[in-house]
Amino acid sequence: MNDVIEFLPALLSGAALTVGLTIASMAIALVLGLLIALGRMSPIGPVRWAMAIYVDFIRGTPLLLQLFYIYYVLPYLGIYIPALMAGILGLSLNYAAYLSEVYRSAISAIGKGQVEAACSLGMRPTPIFILVVLPQALRIAVPPIGNYFISMFKDTALVAVISVNELMFTADQIASTTYKYLEVYTAAFVIYFIVSYPASMLVLKIEDRMKRAPAG
């Protein structure tokens, strides 16, 4: 128990960085994901194809390899990115591809009748999307976005391989110097669970509330 108390502050510091890393990466991924989704639904063929290729490529390759490439390979091309920024970039680019499919599915679920009704009122395409389509699509997209947020929190453990001092990296460093693998990794396990489990319960609650809320 004394050992746990001794290295707990360092683990909590790593956990704080993990949460910050998750929030920053998800914020970027949410914006990029929407832009990619709009690109995939664009009437311009090359834009649509480029976005489709990006999504397929990202989803078809491991996140771990993407992080390695950003941090270790890009310097050979003269592009040097600090470890923390590389972690944020890798996570956001990866999750943007998945979130784009969430957005695209949610937007497609909005009935065309509502768009036609808005057009009959003289609204232009951009206001129709912003005021009519997007709010309803976000309502559909919120539960899966919440699940991806939780998944990203756990996937931040992968950025330990590029030396970002988050929770998993901190646990590895402590365990390798103290040889108290059971205590250190158990404490890290508990911290991940303490953060992710309440978040998953919150997502379920939001999803249930949205299912029971009246449409429109």
Image: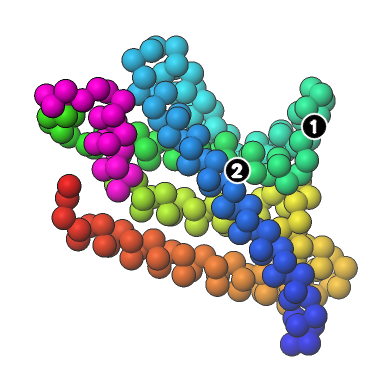
Across and down, in percent, residue 122 comes to 16, 23
Going by the numbered disc 2, the residue's amino acid type is Leu
How many residues crowd around disc 2 within 10 Å: few (fewer than 14), some, or many (20 or more)? many
Range of residues picked out in magenta: 119-139
Q: According to the image, label 2 marks what residue? A: 91
Examine the rendered structure and indicate whether residue 22 appears above or below residue 115. Answer: below
The quarter of the displayed image where residue 65 is located: top right
Q: Is residue 25 left or right of residue 32?
A: right
* Residue at the spot 69% in from the left edge and 49% down from the top edge: 159
Across and down, in percent, residue 132 comes to 24, 36
Examine the rendered structure and indicate whether residue 158 appears above or below residue 17. Answer: above
Q: How many marks?
A: 2
In the image as oriented, which residue stretches furthest toward the right? Answer: 177
The quarter of the displayed image where residue 185 is located: bottom right
* Residue at the spot 31% in from the left edge and 58% down from the top edge: 207
Q: Is residue 76 magenta?
A: no
